[in-house]
Image (cartoon, coloured by chain):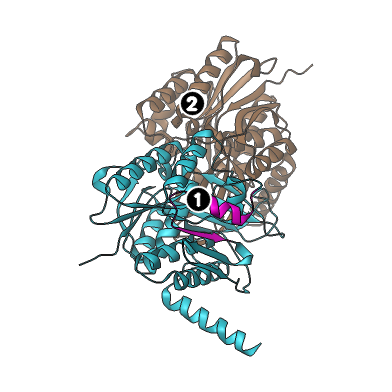
Chain colours: A brown, B cyan
Amino acid sequence: MNTIPTLLTIGELLVEFVSREKGCGLERVTAFDGPFPSGAPAIFLDQAARMGAPTRMIGAVGRDGFGRNLKARLEADGVDTRHIGESETLTTGTAFVSYYDDGTRTFIFHLAGTAADASRFDEAMLPKGEIVLHVSASSLGSAPLRRAIMQATESVLARGGRLSLDPNARPELMRDRESREALENLLARSHFLMPSVSDLDFLFPGLSTEAAIDRLLAMQAEIVAVKKGAEGALLVDRGERHLYAPHAVEEVDPTGAGDGFCGTLMALLLQGRPLEEAGRMANAAGAIAVTRRGPMEGNSTPQEICAFLNAESEKDRKT
Amino acid sequence: MNTIPTLLTIGELLVEFVSREKGCGLERVTAFDGPFPSGAPAIFLDQAARMGAPTRMIGAVGRDGFGRNLKARLEADGVDTRHIGESETLTTGTAFVSYYDDGTRTFIFHLAGTAADASRFDEAMLPKGEIVLHVSASSLGSAPLRRAIMQATESVLARGGRLSLDPNARPELMRDRESREALENLLARSHFLMPSVSDLDFLFPGLSTEAAIDRLLAMQAEIVAVKKGAEGALLVDRGERHLYAPHAVEEVDPTGAGDGFCGTLMALLLQGRPLEEAGRMANAAGAIAVTRRGPMEGNSTPQEICAFLNAESEKDRKT
C-alpha cells in the first residue's frame, strides 16, 4: 500500500536559454544554450521525482519542439505528466537569462499568452490518496495560473491535504496586488515553507531572519526551511533546529538551485526521512545544482547527493 | 523639398534566436545565437532606410535588453523610430528558428501577449507628405496588429497614399479566417505586390505563376515582383517585364532575404530609379542576405550591393 503522499504542482512549464557570455544584459548578440527544461514548479517536481517521491504536474506546453523537450525530460525522471496539456495554438513558454560578473542576473520571461499560463484546474486532475500541493510563488504573477492554483488549494485543503510553498517572489513575475494577496493567503495556510533570505526581506521588510521565522511558525507552518544561498541553509520545526554550512562549490549557474533544494527536502520528508537528514541532502542538492549550467540540469539523484556528501566529508578530514 | 514618399510600416518587432546546429528541431539542447533584430516589417524597413528611403516604423518593444537591441539597430540604420513604443509591462517578442539539412526550417514565435503585437495606430503617427504603407502579411495573424494595420490602411488610402504588400503568409502566423480576409483585402488594394512563388501557390492554388501574375495585375497592382528564391526574381509592370537570374551564393540563413529584397526594391522605386535597375539591385540584396546568419544581419548598403554585382559580372566574364 502506498502511504507516501503525492507531491502535486500546478504552474509554469518553460524552456530556458542561458547566455554563455556574462554581462551581455540580454542586449548584445551572443551565444546562448537551450532549450533547457525549466519553470520553478517543474524543476522542483523533477527533483522530487528523482528523490523517489510520487509526483504529478498540472500544466501545459505547446505542441512544438520546446514542449516535447520538457515532457520527455519530466517523464524520463518519473514525473506523472498525464495532466500536462499540449496546446495546438499556443507555444511553449520561454525564459532567457544572462549573468553579470557580480553574480546578479537579468531575466526575460515569455509566460503571458503562451501555453505556460494556460493551465486550468479540474478536480478530476487530483491524484488518489494523500496530497501535498506545492506552490512556487513565481506562478502567482499570472492571473490564469493564480486562479488555477487557488482553486487547487481549496480542493486539496478540503480533502485534508497539505500545502508547501516556495515564496520565490520574483519582481519580474509579481507586479500586482492580486499576486501579493494570493502569496499572503498561501503563506498563512502552508505546512511547509521554504523561503530564501531575500524572500524574507520581501515578505517582512526590516525584520531579522529569526523574527521572520517566528512569524511564520506562528501561522500554519510546521517546518520552515530558509535558503541562505552561499551561507547554506537553516531548517526549523517546532522542536528541532538545524543549521547547514554551505558547501564550497564553483558557482556556474544558480538558477534552479532553490527549486532543487525544495524538491529534495519535500521528497525526503514525505518519505519519512528525519528532518536533519532531509535538510542535509537538500543543502547538498542545492550546492550540486549551482555547479551545472541550465536550470533543471543541476537536479541530482540520491546516489549523486550521497557521493557528493562523502567527498565533502573526505575533504573535511584532510583539511 | 523632399518629394520622396515615406515608407511606413506597422507590425511586429522581434528578436530572433538561430540554432547553430541543423536538425535539432528546436527540441534538443544546443547552441543558439541571438538576440538578432528581426520581424519581417522591421527587416524590410531597415533595408529600405539603408537604401536611402525616408522610413518610419510603428510598433512596440518591451523595456528590456531585447527592445534596446532592436531600437538601437533601426536607429543606427536611419529608421524613424519615434513611434516605436516601449512597454513597461510586456516583454519584446521573440522568434526561434532552426534549419534542417534539406533547407527547410522550423519556427517558434512568441508574438501574442508580447509588446510585438501591442502596437496601436493613431492618425497622429502618420508622417507628413506622401506615404506608401508597406504591410508584411506575417503581421496579419495577430488580431491587435491586424486591427492597427487595417486602420492605418484606411487612413493612408484616404490621404491619397499607396499600399505595398509582401503576402508572406506563414502558416504558423496565419491560422484564422480574419487574417486571410485581411490579406485578400490588402491584395486587392495594393499598388506594389511582392509575393514569393509559395505565396502565389497559397493565394492561387493550381494556377501557374504567369496566370497568378495576370490575376494580380487585374486588381490595383501596378508592379508585381515575384521572389523565386534559388531561381532568382521576376519583375512585371503593365509595360515592362524583367527576369533576373539567381546569383550562385552559399546559403547560410535565408530568413529575412525576402524582406531585404522588398525593402531594396521599394526604396529604389520610390526614389525614382528605373524598374530594371531596382529589380537588379533587389535581386542582389536578396542573394547577399542569404549568405549571412541572422534575419537582419543580411541587410546591405547600396555600396555593398554594387560591389557584389561588379564581382558577379567579373565572374561571368571569366567563365
Q: Residue A25 has which mark?
A: none
Q: Which percent across, then down, holds residue B12?
A: 43, 48
Query: Over which residues does the magenta segment extend?
Result: B207-227
> In this picture, is A216 found above or below B74?
above
Q: Residue at x 60, y 85 (%)?
A: B315
Query: Is residue A238 at least partly visible in the picture?
Result: no
Q: How many labels sit on residues?
A: 2
Q: Residue at x 66, y 44 (%)?
A: A65
> In this picture, is B160 found above or below A158?
below
Tag 2 and tag 1, C-beta contact below 8 Å: no
> In this picture, is A57 found above or below B255?
above
Query: Could you tell whether B104 is left or right of A205 in the image?
Result: right
| Pick the front one: B96 or B268 | B268
**Residue that label 1 marks:** A97
* Quadrant location of the N terminus of chain A in the rendered image: top right
Q: Amino acid at mark 1?
A: Val
Q: Is residue B210 covered in magenta?
A: yes
Q: Which percent across, then down, holds residue B235?
A: 51, 64
Element assignment for label 2: helix
**Residue that label 2 marks:** A144
Q: Residues within 10 Å of mark 1 (few under 14, many from 20)?
A: some
